[in-house]
Image (cartoon, coloured by chain):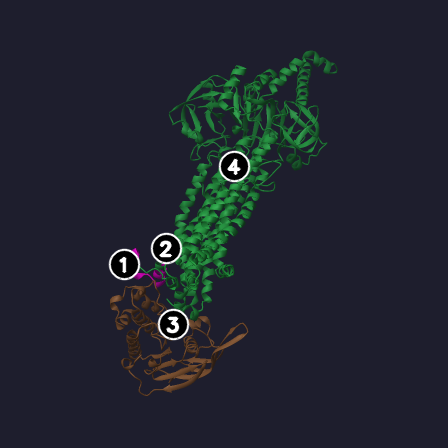
Chain colours: A green, B brown
Amino acid sequence: MLIRKLFRTAWSYKAQFISMIIMITLGMGIFLGFNMEWRTIEVDTGSFFDHTNYADYRLYAEKGFTADDLQRIAAIDGVRQATRYLSVNLDIKGEKNKALALDVSEDFNVSTFLVTDGAAYDENSDGFWLSDKFAAANGYALGDTLTLEFQGTEISGEIVGLIKSGEHMICVADKNQLMPDYHSFGYAYMTPKKLRSAVESKMKKTVADELEKSGVPEEFIDDSLSKLLFTEKDITQALDQVYAQINLLSDVDKETLEDKVKEALGRTIMVTPKDDHIVYQEAMGEAEEGKTMGSVLPVLFLLIAILTMVTTMHRIATKEKLQIGTLKALGFKNRRILRHYTSYGLFIGLIGTGLGTLLGLGVCKLVMSENGMMGTYFDMPDWSAAVPPFCYPVMLVTVLLLTLISFLSVRQQLKGTAADALRPYAPKRMRKMLLERFPFWDKLKFGTKWNLRDLSRHKSRSAMTLFGIVGCMILMVGGLGMRDTMAGFLDLLDHDISNYATKVNLVDNADKKDALSLADEIGGDWESLSGISLDGDTVTLDIVHNPRDQLNVIDEENRRITLSDDGVYLCLRLKDKAEIGDTITFSPYGSSDTYTAKVIGYNRSIMTESVTMTDVLADQLGVEYVPSAIYTDKSADEVRSSELIAGKQDKAQLMETFNSFVQIMDSMVVILVVAAVILGIVVLYNLGIMSYVERSRELATLKVLGFRNRSIGRLLISQNIWLTVIGVIIGLPAGVGVLQWLITALAGEYEMKLMLGTLTYSVSVLLTFGVSLLVGLMVARKNKKINMVEALKGLE
Amino acid sequence: MAIVQFENVTKAYTSGDHELKALNDVSFTLEEGKFVVILGPSGAGKSTLLNLLGGLDSPSEGTITVNGRDISTLSDNELADYRAATVGFVFQFYNLIPTLTVYENVELVSEISKASLDAKQMIAEVGLSDHLHNFPSELSGGEQQRISIARALAKNPRILLCDEPTGALDSETGVMVLKLLLSMARNYGKTIVIVTHNQSIARMADVVIRVKNGKIRSIEEQAEPMRADEVEW
């Protein structure tokens, strides 16, 4: 029978029950969704990396590694597998603005791929295994022929398989590209055998060109003549220079490995763990970002949900006091009554948590699925939905907590005898407020006094309403502000930092003199990026030559810095390493030399942790460098082809890739804003209805006295509006604070400066007021239907 | 001069298939300035009659004319204006606003009534000047009812409608409240309609209307009504 009562009671308090279930669903859903997102990234990318033998370490040497080097490395204790590896960005012949990273793994047990269509890997194959996403975006199919421009010659072959590779799970040309764009950049693998034959072809071509220059008639220049001029050994040596990388699988820590590599090869080699490889770094960065987001906003949601439950359950128990008394008078034991009412909390908790789990799965899938937001970022074969283990106890504790809230609310009403319980709930005695001591109080209108006293009389209800509005504001300012900050960041990148039209990437082994003369020829600024060790950490040394303002460096306040030759600039992420005026000592990888320089400023670096200096200072210090990229205002077509050029990137195209990033951000913002609006509506409506029911007798009295519905409605709405004004005043700075905290927490990934547009402030404030007004009107409408006769009956 | 006229007034409530007539074809008139008691047992229809007269409810059939105006067809807003200008209510459970002080409760009506009387004077007349800044919960039942009378009269209405005004009070306090109610109403020349099941109160009235089962059983004019302090409860 009591079960039947449970459902009927739930029905009679349907507004409260539904809002509590919505709040728990929303709280649990957002909490689980955000946390499942980062956990799924960890699980799915981890499993993909395992399946494709993603390398734990990458060793780089500009002059390449010999087969003997490889053997020595492979023999190091703790190294499970090692391979000489090549990954180089090449343009596709006959295609404008399309390039591929061409990868070759000498030992196909490290840094491999999964075939999604076509032939399995075969070391004797003469074909290419092409990224399936790149193939789909550009209309390539199995059997098509692909020709790549390789150091002045061509490598051609049939597409024999379509693949996905862990090494290119986030397929970007370099660290400056935020998002993959498969229309312009993809990746392909070929066999070491094919690489050897490409190197041989290149050597033949070089010989032929030289013979032709020396006046040897064309008909005499053929393979047999070329073969007389270089041997298999020469080819092997040339190949050794091409393999600039060794990828290996090992659990040894970085310092130990560095020492062992140095010992094995007799020279310092740049050892980068997977944490420094763009794919792993970005994937884990995303997971970290998810963890950060998951630890603030969803917790806020869950907290508001639970607090709403406390207020609402207390009110329901108070309203049920007579029924509780009746049950007690009828002879029901306290324990049974407690069990009955406690089951309300359990019921709400179970339904809310169940629906919340479904919502969480939906939120997670919205982000983590092939067609979801991350689908454009990660290229992996399997998309699951993983729940972090700590979420299970959180779910259990939430249900138990809700049950406990019900239990405590009812226990309070059960105290004393049956007669006590049968007496109606006595509202708190009115006490004068502090405000009433001020002279202006008497001048206030009655409605204002009434509302102020009502707020002070029902403190927990008022505080909850305020909490809901503040939460709503924080979510809106946080969400929209994140977008503003990102947009500002991209704008900075597009206009202040990158003033060029084309970025010309140079080959790794370019000659410094040739590179500088090419930069002069095409009239661009240039920079040289190389790895250095600073206090044991791997950071980038950025040597900049920017007299033309094509590539700029900016300070903490986003102002352009005219680089001085007197010292180096540390990026903001390295601010802790040294104060201005201190000296730092660094050592380039591949060299045992150390250099010391004075820190003269900090700069905002876009992607990498870097130490920036001018070429003049680099020359003074004697640092060896070769330009890595030239930045010019010429279009890509105007830049002549050269062996020095590895690829050209159009800035507009580069910025275009950011658009998909912004789209992801937009979707997240939409989720947050929608959640904020729902949160606002549910909390305010629930509390508004509660306030309305509690004041129904007073409202009926006003109606009887002759107050019109509209004036009474205005009274109800004005209370909401006041709370909204206070909520906005608190919520706005709180939102900015949370955003600043998020940005600081995310600083490891992006050095962003908090930027908030006027539109964000206006939209957040207007939407919050809109929600408050809407709910106020919804509640005020009920006032029309108030039954004066019924409301005035009964005991005070 | 007739201030109230009920003509064939019926008020029916439907509950499922059942129709319950709380008032059934009721007709009567009330003269201005009289003290009228509507008497009847529980469920007789007396409160329904008072609610219709007070503009809290509308009749199912018939017309109610107050001060020459048919109030049975008024809109919600017109009824609110009618309540604000023409009638004042005193309830069994006082219905004061708990979050407003004594003074504010009375002063409140000045927001809706153009002809409202001075709140402080009205409170002084009910003898509670010392409690101007107390909240209702700090007053006794009798004191709360006196404030309720002050509030009803402060609107300066033509008719004062009282629903069991002494129902929640002990006899001594009840007599005191009735005395106050009568003297103030008389001083200000108001028509008073009291609904009660208490026969003793009826002895004080100029007119007694007896109601039973939704019908008027009798309308009796009393040439020499008793004074409040003569009445025994």
The x and y percentages for residue A666 are: 53, 44
Q: Secondary structure at mark 2?
A: helix
Dot 1 and dot 4 residues touching (CB under 8 Å): no
Same subunit under labels 1 and 3?
no
- Give the label on residue A287, or none: 4
Q: State the residue position of label 1.
A: A439
Name which quarter of the figure residue A244 lies in: top right
The x and y percentages for residue B183 are: 28, 78
Residue type (three-letter) at the residue carrying disc 1: Pro
Distance between the Cα atoms at labels 1 and 4? 57 Å
Q: Nearer the viewer, mark 1 or mark 4?
A: 4
Name the chain letter of the residue that bears numbered label 1.
Answer: A
Q: State the residue position of label 2.
A: A459
The x and y percentages for residue B128 are: 26, 69
Q: Is residue A602 visible?
A: yes
Task: Give the quarter of the figure containing the C terminus of chain A.
Answer: bottom left
